[in-house]
Amino acid sequence: MTVGSKVKQTAASLKGAYATLAMYAQILEQEKDKQTFHEAAEQVEQVRNQLEERIKQLEWEEPQYKGI
Amino acid sequence: MPEWIIVSLRTLLAVVVLFFMTKLLGKRQVSELSLFEYITGITIGSIAASICLDLNTSWYLGVLSLVIWSGITIGIEYLQLKSKKARDFIDHRGTVLIQNGKILEDNLKKIRITSDELLTRLRQKNMFKVADVEFAIMEPNGDINVFPTKENQPLTPKDLGIQIPHETVPQTVIMDGKILDHSLNNLGLNRRWLHTELDKAGVTVENVFLGQVDDMGELYLDLFDDTIQVPKPKTRQLLLATLQKALADVKGFALDTNDPKAKKMYRACQEKLEQVIAKVKPRLQ
């Protein structure tokens, strides 16, 4: 497994975590809890975006592994 | 009329009258806070019994007596609600038995309790050492309540300075195989959601004896058939595990890469994920 595909895997699992966090932010009734989960979801999304950036960079540096 | 028919009719009457009396008297009577209420309970019972079986007295006299007893009791309860003075006069007040760790012998004498009895009653409250008791009081109904010294009180999250998330009461959404729409609506959910969750667990509504939803939207199921194992909801643990795995991955990437810019970016990601985990962990356990 190349570095690129490892990063892709992590980004994908963060996408799932983001969805679950966002779901909890919807379900929970306490305003404070909603806020906490909303913020957490935002931060996870930011991390994922940065990883996606890195994936693009890796693919540009090593185009032979693109799409793996 | 043969006697047995009279007795049956009287019994039916007593049951009906007693039913409505107890409805009127309400919950307070059940708890028997004072000696007076205790006696009221017994008296009402024996009057009802004599309505049923005592053929020498007329039935309406018994009913009259019941109505008067209950009327007076309700009257006294209202009086107690309205005035503190009446309350102090009618009810016994609690007697302090131990204060600041010292047994008050005068009060023991006043309510005629021996030291042996005091020890027994303390043991019933799991206090074997008098030294561990800060305060003990005998309530008007004769129960003893004990307040242990600070170091002997059970440890709570507050003592440890831990913040615990607020958790609301779970709602029962399925009872005896029937869906309770009212509680589903309270949670902002509907039947379609419930059916999806039941499909996930692989059961039908008819097989569910009890179903409860907690505030995180997780469904707990108990089936009529106890041999079937229902999968326990694991979304929370899964989410926490996913986040922790991602954190470990990012840490690894930061160590692997030689590009200083990428290293910096991974470190930032790592910090963010650590914050996220710290934030949501208390709610996911």
Image (cartoon, rainbow, N blue to C red):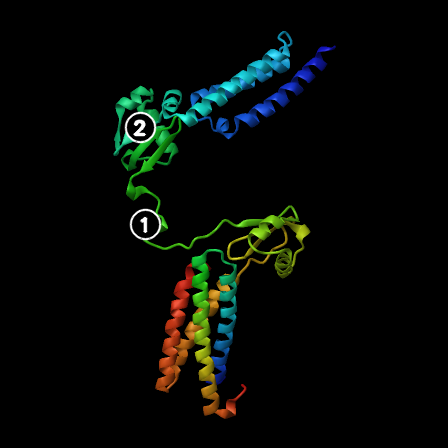
Which chain is disc 2 placed on?
A: B
- Above or below, B106 relative to A32: above
- Residue B42 in view in this figure: no
Residue for badge 2: B96
* Residue depicted at x 37% and y 26%: B84
From the viewer's side, name the closer residue of B145 and B167: B167
Amino acid under disc 2: Val
| Dot 2 and dot 1 within a common chain | yes
B90 left or right, relative to B211:
left
From the viewer's side, name the closer residue of B73 and B138: B73
Spot the residue most to the front.
B82
- Residue A7 in view in this figure: yes
B44 left or right, relative to B87:
right
Mark 1 element type: helix
- Circle 2 residues within 10 Å: few <14, some 14–19, many ≥20: some
Mark 2 element type: strand
Spot the residue most to the right.
B1
Disc number placed over residue B159 in the picture, else none? 1
* Residue depicted at x 43% and y 23%: B79
Q: Which quadrant is home to the C terminus of chain B?
A: bottom left
Amino acid under disc 1: Asp
Q: Which quadrant is home to the N terminus of chain B?
A: top right
* Residue depicted at x 46% and y 68%: A41
A17 left or right, relative to B90:
right
